[in-house]
Image (cartoon, coloured by chain):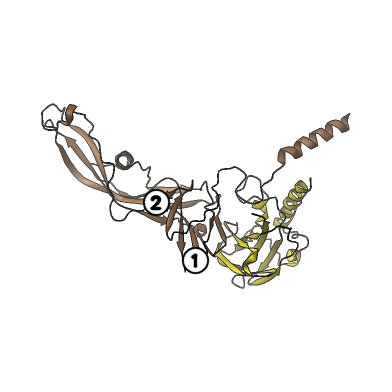
Chain colours: A brown, B yellow
Amino acid sequence: MKKIIAASVLAAALVGIGGTAAYADTTDGTDTPVSTDTTDGAVFSESGEQQTLTDPATTGTGWTSPVTHPGGDTTNSQCEGGVTFYKATNNSTTFTQASGRDSSVTGSNGITLTISRSTTFGVTGTFSATTSVSVNAGVAAVKQDYGWSVAVNKSGTSSSSGAWKVPNSYKIGRLTIGALKHRGAVQQFVQNRACKNVATGSAATYNMPENGWSFQHSKVS
Amino acid sequence: MQKHYRIATAAFLSVVAIGGLGGCSGHSAATAPTTSSAKAPIDPLVRITDRSDDFYSDAQPVVHELSRGTKTFDIGGLPAGTKRITFYVSCAPDSHFEVTMGKTFAGPCERIVGNSGGIPLDSGGGAHVTVKLPAQTQFWLVGIPDED
């Protein structure tokens, strides 16, 4: 009887640890398939979606006044006055390679390159706060006006290995992990009783990485 | 069952290798320079045989070598249907490697493997692979066959 129980436990254990993965990146199901992208300099998110770089400025979604006015009237005197809000502008969105030695690999055409999901990478940014615009207010304004979740410094691991097969049109390709970095300014405004938005104080400037890692595919030669 | 045996075997060999007691059977690792230093590279099989790791594979390595500098190794025992070999390199001190099997995969290497390159077998490299590193740099090279 003991033998039967032992055999059953052993069998159950073997079934439990059984796996069929032929190679990396299939154990937790979170990695993306191998990309076969052929666009030099293209940038992809961890989920495999192509991302847009902009330099020079793009037009954001625009800010929204904290006080709504029926009919869009902004010239009457129905505003409360003294309402403070922030408006973000964006000058550029670029890809910045992460710090760390393993943030880039190269290979000949036909080779599938990957970067480990277990490596911790970092991208630093800057936010020059002013007396009227704090870091928190600036980060919130960028989120509200453009939808980007940014932070002054970013560090962590990726959820994707960024697997990319170097296209046949390249002699050598490079896979790089990094983050989209947004550069711009945040200005504080105060809405007066005449419903006019008046800039107050100095604008803060930012150059901050977006949360989430990105992978750039580039042509070396 | 055979698959589980391979996993257990690979994991055991990795532990043995890390302990500085030897290398992978059937390869030259056992005769390679040994180090007891904490600065020695860590065998990539530690990660490759870890089911929770993104480099996990249950395939038997066809290359598993501990050496120094620039070396060429023969590749044998390729399973039928193998279309490419994915190579993993760890090294100490930190350096920049090149792995060539007809085509070349290059990148930075550290004590813990941090990247990989899958080289197709039809790259014209024949049955050998060359690792290029500075003469005093110790490295582990692991090659995993892939049918995809």
Where is residue A47 drawn, in percent x and y? 49, 46
Contact (Cβ within 8 Å) of mark 1 with mark 2: no
Q: Earlier in the sequence, mark 1 or mark 2?
A: 1
The verdict on a common chain for dots 1 and 2 is: yes
- Quadrant of residue A29 within the rendered picture: top right
Density class for disc 2 (Cα within 10 Å; few <14, some 14-19, many ≥20) is many
- What is the CA distance from the residue labelled 1 to the residue labelled 2? 24 Å
Where is residue B20 drawn, in percent x and y? 72, 59
On the rendered structure, is B109 left or right of A140?
right
Badge 2 is on which residue?
A180
Q: Is any part of residue A182 visible from this angle?
A: yes
Where is residue B1 drawn, in percent x and y? 79, 45
User: Which residue sits at x=31%, y=38%?
Assistant: A144
Is residue B80 positioned above or below A204 on the image? Answer: below
The amino acid pointed to by label 1 is Tyr
- Which chain does the residue under circle 2 lie in? A
Question: Where, quadrant-wise, is the C terminus of chain B in this rendering?
Answer: bottom right
